[in-house]
């Protein structure tokens, strides 16, 4: 038996209402594989029978998960909830989920994960290329939110202010800080180029750790994440595997019709 951090379901479709310049899915370009949910159910059942446990299941995608049909999403949700091997359950969204009541209602009891580069809609939408401010919807205000903040050279000075404001939202329970890994090899995509020009990578990790620790209460680390607390909200920041002192495996990924290697 093994304990894992996340069981990540990555849906195949690249359809999305955003055009994030650092899109990891577009950089990795996984081959399209139609989802076979019978196989997913078999794999999850096998993991359960073998006694495996996960900190969370994460419904993610090459694009936006909420663009899938509601019946498909219902089946995925049922499979993951009936397994009873996931301590927490969350779905990642561009924000599109909040504009569709039926789909939102399906996942409103999950942690809903959104990603921004600024708390300010005009700045955020200018970079991430979307048109409607999902944070103003009633559904967003009712949701249990994990707010991801991507570090950029242009926003790192604002990170304390952004976190502090997010922490005032009653429905934001988690805040996560994300680095963009610069390309070490030949730049082959426009996403590589953008990250190299604008991203903050792990070489700045210690500086960011020290900055956050000046303003928020440091709580130690778990898996590959440093953690802080503010207003009862958890702030986490993934760094790298040198902090994985408990030697548990990080993530388990399922894509299309099969399990992929641990990542």
Image: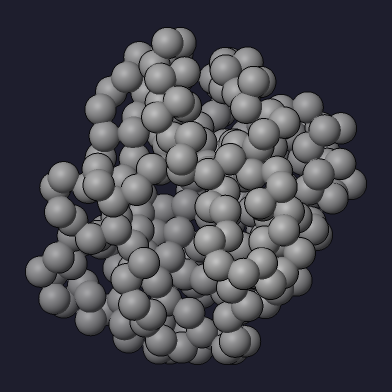
Residue 146 can be seen in this image: no
Residue 79's x, y, as percent? 40, 72
Count the marks: how many?
A: 0
* Figure quadrant of residue 141: top right
Q: Is residue 190 visible?
A: yes
Left or right of 191 on screen, residue 247: left
Q: Give the residue drawn at x 34%, y 40%.
A: 225
State left or right for residue 35 relative to residue 196: left
Q: Position of residue 145 (x, y in %)?
A: 55, 37
Vertical arrangement, residue 236 with respect to residue 262, above or below: above
Q: Which quadrant, please, contains the C terminus?
A: bottom left
- In percent of width and height, residue 53 lies at 21, 61
* Residue found at the very far left of the displayed protein: 1
Q: Is residue 48 above or below residue 258?
A: above
Which residue is rendered at x = 63% and y = 78% of the image?
Answer: 29
The residue located at (35%, 14%) in the rendering is 217
> Which residue is at 72% across, 69% downward?
189
Instruction: Judge whether 103 appears above or below 47 on screen.
Output: above
**Quarter occupied by the N terminus:** bottom left
* Image coords of residue 153 (percent x, y): 67, 34
């Amino acid at each position: 038996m093994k304990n894992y951090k996340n069981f990540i379901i990555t849906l195949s479709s690249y359809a999305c209402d955003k055009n994030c310049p650092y899109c990891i899915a577009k950089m990795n370009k996984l081959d399209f594989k139609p989802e076979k949910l019978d196989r997913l159910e078999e794999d999850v059942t096998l993991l359960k029978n073998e006694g495996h446990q996960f900190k969370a299941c994460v419904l993610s995608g090459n694009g936006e998960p909420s663009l899938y049909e509601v019946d498909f999403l219902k089946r995925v949700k049922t499979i993951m909830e009936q397994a009873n091997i996931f301590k927490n359950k969350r779905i990642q969204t561009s924000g599109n989920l909040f504009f569709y009541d039926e789909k939102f209602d399906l996942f409103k009891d999950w942690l809903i994960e959104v990603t921004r580069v600024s708390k300010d809609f005009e700045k955020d939408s200018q970079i991430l290329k979307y048109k409607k401010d999902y944070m103003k919807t009633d559904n967003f205000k009712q949701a249990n939110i994990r707010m991801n903040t991507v570090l950029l050279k242009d926003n790192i000075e604002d990170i304390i202010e952004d976190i502090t404001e997010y922490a005032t939202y009653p429905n934001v329970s988690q805040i996560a800080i994300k680095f963009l890994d610069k390309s070490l090899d030949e730049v082959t995509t426009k996403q590589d180029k953008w990250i190299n020009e604008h991203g903050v990578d792990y070489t700045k990790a210690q500086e960011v750790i020290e900055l956050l620790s000046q303003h928020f209460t440091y709580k130690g680390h778990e898996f590959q994440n440093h953690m802080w607390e503010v207003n009862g909200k958890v702030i986490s920041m993934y760094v790298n595997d040198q902090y994985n002192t408990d030697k548990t495996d990080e993530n388990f990924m399922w894509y299309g019709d099969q399990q992929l290697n641990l990542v």
